[in-house]
Image (cartoon, coloured by chain):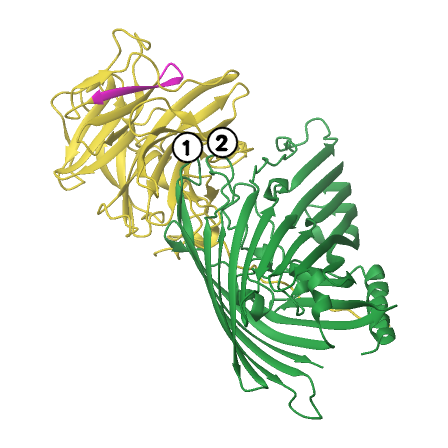
Chain colours: A green, B yellow
Amino acid sequence: MTAHSALGVALGFFAASAVSAEARAALPESYGLGSRAASMAGAVGADAKDFSAVAYNPAGLVEARGLSISVGYTANFHALRSSGGDADVDDVRGMVAGVVAPGKVMGVPFAFGVAVHLPDSGLSFLKARKQDAPRFELYDTRQQLLFLAATLALRPLPWLEVGGGMGYLSATRGRFSIRGSANLASPFDSALEHEVDADLTSVRYPILGVRAWRKRWGAVGVAYRGSSQLELELDARLAGTVALGALAIPLVYELEARTFSAFTPAQLTSSFSFQRIANLNVNLDLSWVQWSAYESPAARINAKLAVEVPPGAPVSLPASALPATPTAPHFRDRIVPRVGVEWRLPIGARIEVPLRCGYAYEASPVPDQRGATTFLDADRHSFALGAGLALSELGAVLPGTLRFDVHAALGVLPTRRILKQNPADFVGDASAGGHIVGLGANAELAF
Amino acid sequence: MVAGCSTLADAGGGDANAPNALAGPFREVRREELGQGRTAPYALRDEDGGVRDVSVLDDDGDPATLGVIALAARRGASAGSTPDASLPTNELVRFSARDGRSFELVPTVVLAAQAAGEGGVVGAPSALRLADGVWLYYAAADGIRLAHATDGLTFERDSTNPVLATATGGWDEGHTPSSPSIVRLPDGSWRMFYEALGAVGEARSQDGRQWTRGVEAVLRPPDGAAGLVAPCAVLSRSALGRERLWLYHSLESADGRRTIEVAAREGFDGPFIGGTATVFGFGSELAPTEPNVVRFADFSLLFVTQRAGKSAAQAYPGVAVGVAPAALGLPAPNP
């Protein structure tokens, strides 16, 4: 690809995304993006050079030697248990795809990358629960969103690479209004009009990265991803008259609901990739994940009911509902270590078989759930394995490289006990744990 | 060109086997959940002659099966007259249900107010199934009394009656206890919770006959409330094995409204701590009282005595049923 065409693709994408309110995204951080990264438990911050660099460290995109197109599929099966029973948390399955387009501008190498994870279940799925409803907050519907991000990378100095871009979410604002007259005795005589007004507005979050090389040793990198969450707003207003026999009772009911969902925390990752030994990459990532910024997913509800009941009317009003104020969840920041190893086994001049493994430990950010909320979660140990096959220079039709990668991962969540402080808690004591099995495959065509 | 489409999302997963103490809040049972031609949420109503204050007992002690027997109080009809539900109850009747709530239509009278000291009153039963049969505690004019039936039908009064008489000292001195609820702890000892002076007292026993009152009420109404009455004690074990003693009760507000609330105790001693929400009857004008809770493997049923309806003609009592977890659908009624 020429510099102009690559730049054109990049600018075109950014121009389109800037006006696209429908773009939605959530990073599949829990399962990895692409089989190479997933098989090293995500420890690729200083070593990602395919489309997965868009998520892990966009500076790595500039390592691409030519236009590459990746497509694959990943399936993650939840076997999460609460108090001994299967919690039936939805599996996360979907297609992953990405494009990396390198080039040069005024002699400076650059690359553009875009990555997407498209869940089988749909583009977006959110579920609002009562505040006190138990839930696997980190693995439930939070993962059921389209991931979409686009980044650029530059190499201003031979040893320095920088990159940055945006990820996208969409927020929803809605207004629902009903007016007219409702006849309780004869519903068909009711005359009601309703009006729905909903907007999708985009939420963007930054993805930044830098990587520095030292010859014969490897690379170090730092990457930052901003936080994101969806804010769902619903305003409803019911204004009119309720007819009860000969009585006409005017009323106004107003409801405001604000909900946060699909929170993805800000994350700062420092990475090291040791590449002193030929055909061997040993990677270590250390991520600070700001879960302390997590806001309660419970709806903030404010409702007002104004009714003028005529004296003597056989109507009693319900007790006024107090505004619902969610309890602060007090999640904790966490440091996540990740280790990944890749050993590339050359077979002749044109074939290479990489073997990979990885491990990550994610301490639960959820504090002891002794009060009103029951966020189910446990520490997670992730073990991953993977392999690949890279075929180079297959002929005039395919002068680049064709890669296949597969991975399998096992996440183990040792059982965590939840002891409620109030013996009269309606949820009661509980336990949470289980495991997650991830499988996936990727194909990449690099020109 | 702008094109769009939409689909209705499914409910998604993540809610199966959610931890739940099966202690409430309760929702009213629905029409399709109640058999025997009963009118939901009433398991017992006018056709049962003003039956009230039910004590429901798992008929085999196995929470995996739904069969129950219910002992309830009512005002028996005099010859040639209809019962007057406004008068104190004077007989205890027994119903059974194979599904835990759809009671048979014709009950059996198991105890009538005939003994001296009962003052023509028997009511507010609290029954336990033990190895030697059913032990039935009930309220009478002279206090809490006890009767036994090896077959669950033929009750014989205990010779020690009343087992808890009018207090001669302490916080409820001079007052006759009523509305008993009795549980037997795993160590074989007994606890009785009873109503007096608009509060709940506790008594302890080693044999179920000789009782020692506590020096203070264990549960009193909060500021602004008129009374805290009709206790119902339930034992449970949490998912992590911690023992709980739940105490359901009816809270009466100053304006005459009543709701069913719950408090619980860690283990079998110590203070009761209130629940975080009303378990039944929030906003209701039917004034529920005399709660009784029976626990099954996957859900609990709450039986309350409340007005049969809002109209003046429905001022007589009925026994309504609630279920927890509220999101759960009950298995089909039988029959």
Numbered range of the magenta stretch: B196-204
- What's the distance in space between the residues labelled 2 and 1, CA to CA? 8 Å
Q: Position of residue A128 (x, y in %)?
A: 60, 49
Residue A154 falls inside the magenta stretch: no
Q: Secondary structure at mark 1?
A: loop
Q: Which residue bears the numbered disc 1?
A: A424
Marks 2 and 1: CB-CB under 8 Å? yes
Q: Main secondary structure of the magenta part?
A: strand
Determine which quarter of the picture holds residue B230.
top left
Q: Position of residue A333 (x, y in %)?
A: 57, 42
Q: Which residue bears the numbered disc 2?
A: B276
Residue B201 falls inside the magenta stretch: yes
User: Of B85 and B263, which appears nearest the observer?
Assistant: B263
Query: Could you tell me if residue A247 is visible in this image?
Result: no
When the figure is inspected, residue A213 is found, relative to residue A442, above or below; the finding is above
Task: Write the residue at 49% across / 71% down.
Answer: A386
* Label 2 environment density (alpha carbons within 10 Å; few <14, some 14–19, many ≥20): some
When the figure is inspected, residue A305 is found, relative to residue A158, above or below; the finding is above
User: Of A85 and B274, which appears nearest the observer?
Assistant: A85
When the figure is inspected, residue B92 is found, relative to residue B160, above or below; the finding is below
Determine which quarter of the picture holds residue A311.
top right
Query: Could you tell me if residue B4 is visible in this image?
Result: yes
**Disc 1 marks which amino acid?**
Ala
